[in-house]
Amino acid sequence: MVSAISSLLMDNSPACTGVKYKRVVLKLSGEVLRGKKAGGDPIDADVLEQICLQVKEVHEMGVQVCVVIGGGNIFRGLQGEKRGVDRTTGDYMGMLATVINGLAIMDCLEGLGVKVRVQSSIPMNQVAEPFILRRATRHLEKGRVVVFVAGTGNPYFSTDTSAALRASEVGADIVMKATKVDGIYDKDPMKFPDAVRYDEIKYVDALRQRLNVMDATAFSLCQENNIPILVFNLNDPGAIRRALMGEKVGTLVRA
């Protein structure tokens, strides 16, 4: 009883009221950090701050936030393979790119007054903690944002798979996949003006229609562990907050 009371007193996490999802994994592609400027810096400072302000907003609502970041703005393994780079080597290069992005997110969030921990799937103790599930969970309980970098630590797996894996491990209520479009369509809305957006769709229907939600491994993990996936437009101000409050935002994939 004493230890339980002590644990409660040590828990620094803010109160979580009025939200639909209490613990979330936010999946960001590296490309979103580049911004809209052609040939611009790999990390656009204004875009980075905009993203971090949204994360801070929901964190202050008491939501426990994990971030999984890609590295495509710096290097992508599949693109390297097309230029003759060994696939395994290219994937490890991409993992290192996610570490750079993760540190940028950490620095920006800390500048906004948010406590952050970066955990890496590849040991690099000088810059990030190793991924340890119990430690990550405790960080969340103490009100810290946890940024997961270096993918799963293995080549041939995407950061989508990493997001699904970490969501399964930490017991997240939802995976929120930020994209440049406002949901899932029956066909490419950039090519077909008559494309229809789904407000909600079942896993089985998304698979049957071969809709581009996540890669197959990531999608299977979410389906097997019954973790819903929300696909939404990150450029929509307040989209994360509204979704967590239960408003209809983007497309929800669930059983």
Image (cartoon, grey):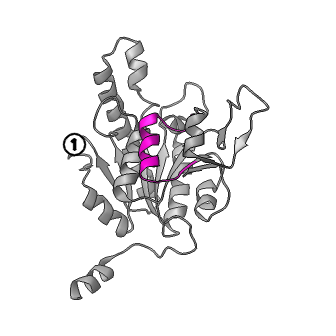
Residue extending furthest toward the bottom: 2
The image position of residue 205, as x and y in percent, is 60, 41
The picture quadrant where one finds residue 89 is: top left
Instruction: Quadrant for the N terminus, please.
Output: bottom left
Quarter location, residue 170: bottom left
Q: What residue is drawn where x is 78% and y is 30%?
A: 193
Q: Within 10 angstroms of label 1, few (less than 14), some, or many (20 or more) residues?
A: few
Q: Is residue 221 above or below residue 18?
A: above
Q: Where's residue 65, x and y in %? A: 44, 59
User: Do we see residue 104 in this rendering?
Assistant: no
Residue at 68% across / 57% down in the picture? 248
Q: In the depicted view, which residue is nearer to us: 152 or 236? A: 152
Magenta span: 211-230
Most extreme residue toward the top is 84
Q: How many marks?
A: 1
- Find residue 110 and report its image quarter: bottom left
Looking at the image, residue 182 sits to the left or right of residue 126; the answer is right
Q: Which residue corresponds to the image point at 53% horizontal and 46% vertical from the top-left?
A: 177
- Residue 165 position within the rendered picture, expressed as x and y whole percent measured from the top left: 37, 47
The answer, for residue 8, to whether it is visible in the render is: yes
Q: Secondary structure at mark 1?
A: loop
Which residue position holds label 1?
A: 124
Instruction: Residue lying at the far right in this picture: please name it.
Output: 194
- Tag 1: residue type? Met
Front residue of 241 and 218: 218
On the image, the x and y values in percent for residue 225 come to 42, 52
Residue at the image point whose x is 44% and y is 55% from the top: 109
Q: Is residue 144 left or right of residue 50?
A: left
- Please check the rendered image and state whether residue 229 is part of the magenta-colored stretch, yes or no: yes
129 left or right, relative to 251: left
Q: Nearer the viewer, residue 58 or 251?
A: 251
